[in-house]
Image (cartoon, grey):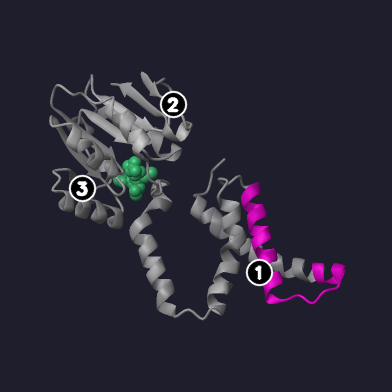
Amino acid sequence: MMRWPVSLQSLAAQCMALLLAIPLTELLQILFSFQATLWSFVFVQGGIAAALSRVWRQAAWWPPLHLVFLPTIFLARQAGLPAWIHLAIFVLLVLFYWSTFRTRVPLYLSGHRAWHALASLLPRAHTFRFIDLGSGLGGVPLYLEPDFPHGRFYGTEIAPAPWFISRVRAWLKGSRVNFMRDDYASLDLSRFDVVFAFLSPAAMPDLWQQARTQMRRGTLFISLAFLVEGRAPDHVLAGNAGARHTLYAWRM
Ligand SMILES: C[S@@+](CC[C@H](N)C(=O)[O-])C[C@H]1O[C@@H](n2cnc3c(N)ncnc32)[C@H](O)[C@@H]1O
């Protein structure tokens, strides 16, 4: 069965909920004899949208988002915020999340524990080229670089704001990490000896296909938190705080 992109599904859930909320609010008024207000309508709409989201098996964070979506808009209107604030927030979100609706990989950051484990997988005695695919704010290569004088570090990030922040961080630190603003799908991974990714389950099948096609024999593909289908990892470094800190590595 064809599955809609989650953004279209969510739009449909909100629109359908708007249509269904009108008769349902009327019915509730009749059954419980109360005077419906705009707020009761808005929460009925949110409840229906959240229920549709669950029925359509959207990820766990969607139903609460649907529940508060329309109420938040009304709250913002009542607060009388100037119109430019909405535009500014929208532009900021676009700059940080860019094409998340397509890539299905939002910005969220890994931490020191994972970076420390990652360092234990990198070669200390010979030169290598490392890339972080989807480098976010640049934390991973900026953390590793000082400990690996033989390493040449790269990051690639599709969203403009995180990419810009990582360039500024590298400049402030006097770092040689090369942060590119490219879709990793357009890169040739055969240029790298270690490829690291912390993305999402949705991104893994295509990325694994790309890695298998392009990476050279003997190089290392490392994924934080997300496995690939069809091949068990050669190394598993389990962080003690669960799957979010588990590193999986495959020798190509
Ligand atoms: C989960 S964050 C990881 C950030 C960083 N690597 C870390 O470990 O803290 C994933 C990042 O990948 C970026 N991204 C998603 N798809 C991408 C693509 N096709 N090419 C480049 N970057 C991408 C997102 O914008 C996001 O910043």
Residue identified by numbered label 1: 42
Q: CA distance from mark 3 to mark 1?
A: 44 Å
Q: Nearer the viewer, mark 1 or mark 2?
A: 1
Q: Amino acid at mark 1?
A: Val
Left or right of residue 29, residue 133 in this image: left
- Which quadrant would the N terminus be assigned to in this image? top right
Q: Quick one: SS at disc 2?
A: loop
Discs 3, 2 touching: Cβ within 8 Å: no
Q: CA distance from mark 3 to mark 2?
A: 28 Å
| Residues in magenta, as a range | 28-55
Residue identified by numbered label 3: 180
Residue 110 screen position, x and y as percent:
37, 41
Residue identified by numbered label 2: 229
Asked where in the image residue 50 lies, by quadrant, the reply is bottom right
Residue 145 screen position, x and y as percent:
19, 37
Discs 3, 1 touching: Cβ within 8 Å: no
In this view, the residue in front, 183 or 194, is 194
Q: Amino acid at mark 2?
A: Glu
Left or right of residue 124, residue 35 in this image: right
Left or right of residue 60, residue 23 in this image: right
Discs 1, 2 touching: Cβ within 8 Å: no
